[in-house]
Image (spheres, rainbow, N blue to C red):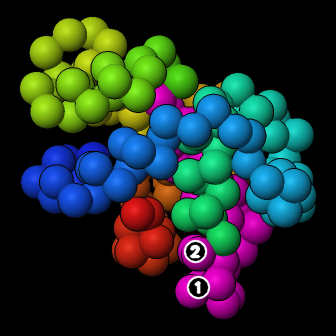
Amino acid sequence: MSNLREFAADPLHLIVRFFGSLSPHPPSIDAERFADDHLLPGERNLWIQMSNQDRRHSAAVAMRFAESRTKSTRDEIAGALLHDVGKLECELGTFSRTVATVVGPRTKRYRAYHDHEELGARLAERAGSTQATVELIAERGPAFDDLTRCDF
């Protein structure tokens, strides 16, 4: 089950994420370096297309993931960094994402938001990601449970 769908029932999580997403500030230098160290060139190109808010979130998730899964591979960390890259396809801002979370996949863009895992997996595959990275973005593979625990 998608993190989005699971967290839709957790109002506190949604509130924290909402207020955290209001800041337009880019990721920290450490987060940028972390991404540079773990992304292939095509993956890095996808990552920098993400909003500052999404890059800050994905870097924080990936850093927690790498810390908690001490034997994580570069491919898995790349998957953690790109786990929300499919949200590029929905072209929704913070307020519209909030509405999409509440009302569900009622429009094409809201449906893309709810299907961002599969969309992101396809983007990553086209960008040259490994199968392990693509699977993790698509919410599959041996590291998915660890990623889910770190995605808050």
- What secondary structure characterizes most of the magenta part? helix
| Residue 38 image position (x, y, % from top left) | 81, 60
Could you tell me which quadrant the N terminus lies in?
bottom left
Residue 67 in percent (x, y) is at 64, 84
x then y, percent, for residue 128: 75, 38
Check residue 84 for magenta coloring.
Answer: yes
Can residue 140 be seen here? The reply is: yes
Question: Which sits in the foreground, 126 or 19?
Answer: 19
Task: Confirm or deny contact between disc 1 and disc 2 (CB under 8 A).
Answer: yes
Say the numbered circle drawn on residue 31. none
Q: Amino acid at mark 1?
A: Arg
Does residue 21 appear to the left or right of 104 in the view shown? right
Q: Residue at x 16, y 54 (%)?
A: 11
State the quadrant of the C terminus.
bottom left
Question: Which span is picked out in magenta?
Answer: 64-87
Residue appearing at x 27%, y 31% in the figure: 98
Q: Residues within 10 Å of mark 2 (few under 14, many from 20)?
A: many
Where residue 147 sits in the image (x, y, percent)?
47, 69
Which residue does the numbered mark 2 point to in the structure image?
65
Residue 69 badge: 1
What kind of element bears circle 2? Answer: helix
| Image position of 112 (left or right of 45) | left
Q: CA distance from mark 1 to mark 2?
A: 6 Å
Depth check, front residue: 93 or 108: 93
Residue pictured at 11% horizontal, 54% vertical: 9
Is residue 23 one of those drawn in magenta? no
Query: Does residue 103 appear to the left or right of 25 in the view shown?
Result: left
Displayed quadrant of residue 96: top left
Amino acid at the residue labelled 2: Phe
Please tell me whether mark 1 sits on a helix, a strand or a loop. loop
